[in-house]
Image (cartoon, rainbow, N blue to C red):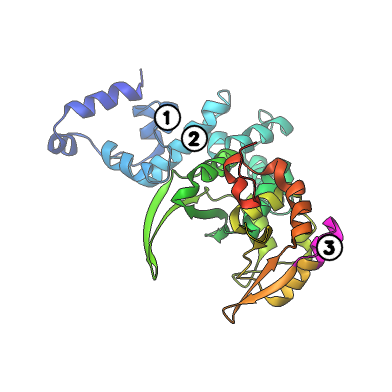
Amino acid sequence: MKVFLRYKRGLNNMDKEDSVKNIKALKSLGAVRDEFDIIELSKKVKRQGDVLILSKELKIKPRILKSAVYEGRILSLLPDISKSKAGILASLRTDRDVRKFAKIHDLGSISARELIKKVRLWNKNLEENPFNLLTRKEHEVILGTLMGDASIRKRERNSCLRFSHSIKQKEYCKIKKEILESFNLSEFREYKRLKKNGILHTLDFATKTHSVFNYYRNLFYSEGKKVITQEILNQLTSRSLAFWICDDGSYCKSGKYIILCTNSFSFEEHQLIQRFFLKKFGLNPTIGFRDNKYHYLRFSKSDTEKLVNIVKPFIPPFMNYKIGVTKNV
């Protein structure tokens, strides 16, 4: 019986030098299938670096191990699927992809060649319509945090969502992580960066790459630079605003007003955002200028009160200081 855990215990009992001598490197997917329970094997890989670590430990080529892990993940979700089709379905990057895809296709009757076409079409369609996969809440949060500190990084074919916050906002980071859990965010990565005024202690995150994030890359970026367009603003909701404020907002206690630190946007983009707030929410923020190079948005005291009522239902209690609420109610 192919039991991964039994084999693993055997490895642990060997001297490292002996294990290198006595275990042959597995160079094919078939050999890995023969030697291991690949479903159990797939459960051992929880983050990107685990494949390389496990490949060295078990003497399996990383590329082969990755294929086995992907196949094991699919078989754990669809135990009746053939191994050849499991390999094709492995390009569906999340468990949610697999389940949704399996609901709309009769996987037993589709040929392998036809399945390849349908999987490619699924991923392509996500670049144009994220709601084929995402919930509305996920979409709104992604939009809000991209208006703020988050970014989309394009890799070879697909993209990933990345964001970074101060260590003081760890609980807020956990909220984002929970909302986007389907995309296997990396564990908290803590960094200490040297700045002019001291050391900045941050938490950095990244999702796995996925075709659905290509939609947001195309929506927010032009020639590699983040830009704000009317198409983006038309999709913002109260929840989006809440996460934008949590990212970039600041409350002035003495003046009782909110500022959005939109430093990276041009003056023309600020004008566009200003018109958006007026038309959709009846708010009229002023465009400020500081340090002879940065623009920002400032809401009057009365508009701040209106804005707080709009976003408060979606603000995590521990972030209430961003809207001037001192009690966690």
- Asked which quadrant contains residue 17, the reply is top left
Amino acid of disc 2: Glu
The mark that comes first in sequence, 2 or 3, is: 2
- The local crowd at label 1, few if under 14, some if 14 to 19, many if 20 or more residues have their Cα within 10 Å, is many
So how many labels did they put on this image? 3
Q: CA distance from mark 2 to mark 3?
A: 51 Å
The mark that comes first in sequence, 2 or 1, is: 1
| Circle 2/circle 1 CB separation < 8 Å | yes
| Tag in front: 2 or 3 | 3
Q: Nearer the viewer, residue 90 or 319?
A: 319
Locate the C terminus by quadrant.
Answer: top right
Q: Residue 121 at x, y = what percent? A: 69, 48
Residue bearing mark 2: 71
Q: Which residue sits at x=76%, y=47%?
A: 309
- Image: magenta residue range: 275-285
Amino acid of disc 1: Ile
In the image, is residue 253 above or below residue 73? below
Q: Which residue sits at x=54%, y=60%?
A: 153
Q: CA distance from mark 1 to mark 3?
A: 56 Å
Q: Nearer the viewer, residue 11 or 268?
A: 268
- The local crowd at label 2, few if under 14, some if 14 to 19, many if 20 or more residues have their Cα within 10 Å, is many
Find residue 278 and name its label.
3
Q: Which residue sits at x=41%, y=26%?
A: 40
Could one spot residue 39 in this view of the protein? yes
Determine whether the residue tagged by mark 2 lies in a helix, strand or loop.
helix
Q: Residue 264 at x, y = what percent? A: 60, 70
- Asked which quadrant contains residue 55, the reply is top left
